[in-house]
Amino acid sequence: MNIQEILQKAIEVSASDIFIVAGLPITFKCDGRQERMPGDILLPDRIQELVEEIYTISGRNRSNLENGMDDDFSFAVSKLGRFRVNVFRQRGSLATVIRVIQFGLPDPEQLGIPEAVLSLADNKKGLVLVAGSAGTGKSTTLACMIDRINRTRDGHIITMEDPIEYIHRHQRSIVTQREISIDTPGYLESLRSALRESPDVILLGEMRDYETISSAITAAETGVLLLSTLHTSSAANTISRILDVFPANQQKQVKIQLAQTLRGVVCQQLVPSVEGGQIAVFEIMKTTTAIRNMIREDKLHQLESAMQAGAAEGMCTMDGSLLKLYKEGRITKDTALVSCVNYENMVKRLG
């Protein structure tokens, strides 16, 4: 199969990822499980040919690869879909993993994204964070939020992504999408530039380091709505991660800034369902007056109790969401235990 046929097959079997690695046949990831395609085991020369086809079909410059660097980019194939590619070397040969992104924007109802998550996009200013490990759907959740804003209010939405996954058309809002390393050198430069481009909403693909996090908090203080991601597993961990990048003598001030600007934190993961496939599970924190005080006074250990008490406002903990899914018969007891944050407490709650 050539690369176009591989991409076509991946769409047909609803694969989320394609693995092209020496020593294995073409492998698809479908609903969290690996499915190896019938055919020969891939050898380095064959992988080199497929990688060359990817660069040809995408029109991508090969300079990163030729300079011995990993390469991360996205491209679209007409009438097929969009694909996010990472090309790298392992054991002396090339390898690539391709993320499959269907044309069109995701449907939050079909994906099980609750209204309490989407409604965070209704904020006109402040900081909204979506957290979770790689591959848990953070970009998809943010795409749904951006689409909601785009359809419901006037404004200028600026996204900074590495790479661009979902394409947003201009609707009520103007949407400008910048891809890191192609349209702008990096997140920090793009963020500083965005503040001079009359933004109403900024999507920052990832808050990676001190400079970017500091600039993002400052941007949120200017009266824009800033959405971004972190690789953390709970609301408390998310806030701790932000504070930890700052020197000790700045952390008191950052707690005050976060208490003022943070509008909500969503943590998510994908877990296997009893019916096959995967279910998105969410922890949702909205910054009430009580939660602002906890952040300001460094009482993050109390956030879980505050989320449990805030059910009427759409808040929930990760363990509470898992327990609900188990009681509904949608996930197994083992899945709830493996995926929970507080194992001992979950054992007691499961009886």
Image: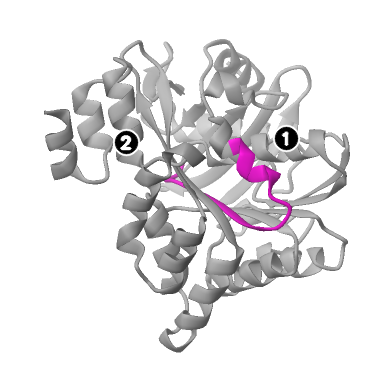
Task: Characterize the local packing of mark 2: few (<14), some (14-19) or many (20 or more) Cα atoms within 10 angstroms.
Answer: some
- In the rendered image, which quarter contains the C terminus? top left
Image mark for residue 66: none
Quarter of the figure with residue 7: top right
User: Between 136 and 320, which is closer to the camera in this rendering?
Assistant: 320
Q: Residue tagged by mark 2? A: 320
Q: How far, Cα to Cα, is label 2 from label 1?
A: 27 Å
Query: Is 302 contained in the magenta span?
Result: no
Reply above or below: 97 against 264: above
Residue 171: % across, % down:
87, 34
Question: Within 10 Å of the Cα at label 1, are there few (<14), some (14-19), or many (20+) other Cα atoms?
Answer: some
Q: Is residue 224 left or right of residue 262?
A: right
The correct choice, above or below, for 89 with respect to 240 in the image is above
Residue 29 vs 299, above or below: the answer is: above
Residue at the spot x=41%, y=85% of the render? Answer: 248
Nearer to me, 303 or 127: 303
Identify the magenta region: 118-134
Tell me if 319 is positioned left or right of 176 in this view.
left
Q: Which residue lies under the disc numbered 1?
A: 148
